Amino acid sequence: MTHLAARGQGTAPDRTTDSAVRAQWLEREVQILEEKISFFDELSFKIKGWGVTVWSAIVTIAVTQDSWQVGTLALPAVCAFLLLEASYKRYQSCFVERTRDIMRYLNDPTFRAQWSDARPFPVYDMLNIHTKGQQHDPYSQRWGSVGRLLFKASVGLIYWGLLVVSLLVVGLLAYT
């Protein structure tokens, strides 16, 4: 007899069945979250590619036309791609955090012991994962987290390098 059938008959639910169902839901949620994390990784790679392409086009035009004014256009372009990637990484970090919490719940008995029947480990509504008010909801994150991501090596390193090179190119073009 399933857990839901047992509840329908008015009998008390079996704790092991409830825990097993909860674990199955959490394992499925991890699969969904890992798919989302992979999507954001692919998107990050594309954004970096677009950023480098746009930057190199602007710098190439600036150098061929010997125009430092055109070269300055590379600075806001790089900043725009940096902010775009940081905002997507903000969402991805929420999914990574949730995945870590689930894996810790599933694999660490001492962490799992902190949860009880009165306060069970939260299982998301799979059809509406972005419901406001849930602890790991990406929409409830503050925009301040984007500022921290700007200086994370996996996000900002390439863009900070492009900004430095852009400033050098603009400087060389302006003084020659």
Image (cartoon, grey):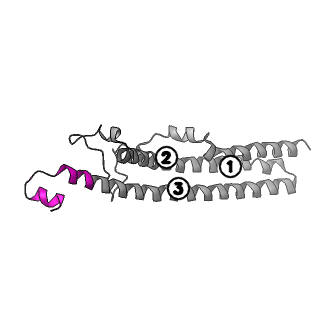
Give residue 141's quadrant in the image.
top left
Secondary structure type for disc 1: helix
Dot 3, how many residues are within 10 Å of its Cα: few (below 14), some (14-19), or many (20+)? some
Q: Which residue is mark 1?
A: 78
The answer to whether marks 3 and 1 mark residues whose Cβ atoms lie closer than 8 Å is no
Indicate the amino acid at tag 3.
Phe
Q: Is residue 19 magenta?
A: yes
Q: In percent of the image, x 53 and y 48: which residue is there?
A: 89
Secondary structure type for disc 3: helix
The secondary structure making up most of the magenta span is: helix
Q: 156 above or below 52?
A: above
Q: Which residues are magenta?
A: 1-20
Dot 1, how many residues are within 10 Å of its Cα: few (below 14), some (14-19), or many (20+)? many
Q: Which residue is mark 3?
A: 40
Q: Which residue is mark 2?
A: 93
Q: 133 above or below 3?
A: above
Residue 109, position as x, y percentages in the image: 33, 41
